Structures are given as structure tokens and as C-alpha cells.
Amino acid sequence: MTHPFLDLAPLSAAHFAAIEDRVARLLDTEQDVVIMQGEALLPLEGAIRSTAGPGTLALNVITGPYGQTFGNWLRDCGAEVIDLSVPFHTAVTADQVREAFAAHPGIDFVSLVHAEAATGNTNPVAEIGEIARAHGAIFYVDAVASIGAEPVLPDAWGVDLCVIGAQKAMGGPAGVSAVSVSSRAWARMTANPGAPRHSYLSLLDWKDRWTDAGRTALPHAPAQLEMLALEACVERIESEGLSTVIQRHATAAAATRAGALALGGGLEPYVHKASEAAPVATTLRTPPGVVASELVASALSSNPGLPLAAGGGALAKEMIRVNHYGVDATAEAVRNSLAALGTALAGQGASVDLEAARSAVESTWRR
């Protein structure tokens, strides 16, 4: 008995290369794009270990948990790390990055998360890229959450290593990811004696055996189902139009913020400024005495399919995430999520206005 997901012809090198090319067009980049056969943590770690090591002076911007992870990897590589931490309810500023370079002119590597879905903020990549390039620093950006929800332009912004994953705003699979690599980054890797070789983390292996070899023979068997799913989600974005997909996410974020403020009950945006809030997900702060994880559990009890989650770790006490990305970047998902949260708050004795929240969502979407 045949099965459409199991009885598949092998994925050819030409087909694999064609998918890479479509991802490159999505990023509007002339850089090499390598699709790696694993979740985005694979190229995120691989890119750091390939370009950083003893002698590296890294500026690591922390606006959420992933920035903390990058600092750990950098230190493990032997790099000296300067952490630039800002409160999770805000974004880093270009002036803060300039000040860091002024205090440490030897910085030659900058790591940054574009959109922190875990905390709901988004950072000014274009401005920071201009500063990094002016100082000759390699610029590494995690755009896993932002791709599809807001513009991601490695070439225009001077990003040397731009890592993306399809599982959030792109609405695709989690099992494959990609990284665009500038010529400057390749040169840095080639000169790095500690760069992984003969390793699943190795970007240089892909360069030698795939990119520089003309992309005619795959280094190993690809994750076929995930590659086909990645192709399908890029195809869907192309069909809808990337600008339309981005606008849908921006509208979902604006509607969630407006609806939460209209709802009342003590719920308020976690990221203070709307301009610093990520379009991929909206984080909300619960009122004093209300535990976020318990409120989310109550909201999901009647509708478990809603894109709601409590914050991770210590944030589980005070933060709720409305993950309006991918197929959930819709008025219905936002409206139903806020209605469920409002009902759960009312169940704890809070005064909420469900109709005002619904109206705010609808009016924002119409605009």
C-alpha cells in the first residue's frame, strides 16, 4: 500500500538547490544560503562556533532568553563577551550599541536577536548593522521569529550571518532551517582554526562539499519531508505576497494590543512601546495576584487550540504570549484568544469588557 508521505522519490540535488534559491529570494539576498537539516538551533550554534573563538571580542545583545544562550556559546568557544542587557519589556537602541563600541573599540563580532518571540520585543537590526559594518565587525542575527512577520534584509542591513526558521511566521516546518552567509563571514570561518569541521555543526563542510562544489551532489541524505514542507510554505508566501503576509502579522499585533487594552481586567502589554513590540507575538502582563500560567490554563480549558502560552521560566508567573503567527495571524485567532483570557479573568473576579475588546480587534483589523 502506497502512502503519499512515505513513498517519495529521493530529493535530488537540483531540487534541494532550487529550494535554497527560493529562500534566498525570500531574504532578497545575494549571499550564499545554506539550508541545514535540523531545527534553527543547529545553524544558530554552528554559525557562532564557526566564526568565534579565542581572540574574538563579542558584543552580545540580550533582550530575551536566546541572547543569553548566544553568550554562553560564545564563551564556550573561548571568545571574550561583553553582554549588553536591556529590560525584556523594551528593545535595545542603536545608541546603546554605539556606546558599547566606544567603550570597547576592539569589538569584532555582534550577536543579536531580531524578534524575541519569548519576550515580545523586536530590535532595530538595520541601524545596528550600520554600526557593526562601520567598525568591521561580523554581524550575526537570529531572524527565526521575525522572518515572515517583518522585513528581514541581510544584504541591505549588513548582516553577515542571518539564521531563519520556518516554524513561526512562515507557517512551515521546524525540522529544517537556513542561514545566509556573507563573503566576510566565510573568510572569518576559513581563518578560524576552531571552526567545526567534519561535524553536523559545520558550515564549512557545506561550503566545501556543496556550495563551492557547484551544488550537484548532496553531502548526505536530506530531511526530505521537511524540505518539501519548507518549499510548500515558501510557495504559499510567494502566492500570498510577502508584503501581505508581513502586513497580516503587523495587523494581528496591533489588534491584540488594542484588544487587550480595551479588555481591561488589569491585563496590559508587556512591551511598553508599540514600536518596540514584535509583530510575531504579543506578550501581556497579568495583574498583581494573577498567575499567568494558571490564567492561560483556564483560558485553554474550553478552547485548547488557541495560540496562547505562558512565559517561560520565571516569566510564567506574570507573562502571557499570544502567538499570532503563521496561520494564527488572523482576526479570529486574536479575537478568540482575548475572549478566552477575558472569560478566565472574569472567573477570578476581574472586571472585563469582552465587547470592547472584540470591537477594538475588529476596528483595528478594518483599518
Image: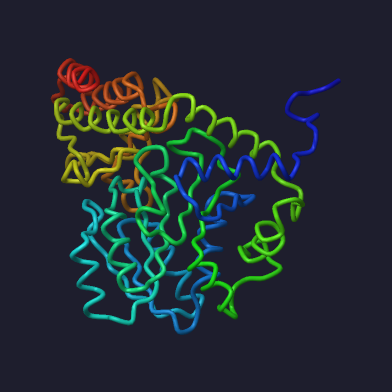
Residue 324 falls left or right of residue 164: left
Coordinates of residue 283 in the picture (x, y in percent): 28, 41
**Residue 215, position as x, y percentages in the image:** 70, 52
Q: Residue placed at 55% from the left, 72% from the top?
A: 189
Number of numbered discs overlaid on the protein picture:
0
- Image quadrant in which you'd find residue 49: bottom right
The quarter of the image holding the N terminus is: top right
Q: Residue at x 42, y 54 (%)?
A: 142
Residue 339 location, quadrant = top left
**Which residue: 22% across, 80% down?**
103
Question: Which of 104 and 67 lies nearest the eye of the viewer?
Answer: 104
Residue furthest out toward the bottom: 55
Is residue 269 found left or right of 211 in the rendered image?
Answer: left
Q: Which of 77 and 339 is in front in this view?
A: 77
Q: Which of 100 and 303 is in front in this view?
A: 100
Q: In which quarter of the image is residue 196?
A: bottom right
Q: Name the residue rendered at 22%, 39% in the picture.
A: 286
Where 253 sits versus 82, above or below? above
- Location of the C terminus (image quadrant): top left
Identify whether 132 is placed above or below 155. Answer: below
Residue 59 position within the rendered picture, expressed as x and y whole percent measured from the top left: 34, 71
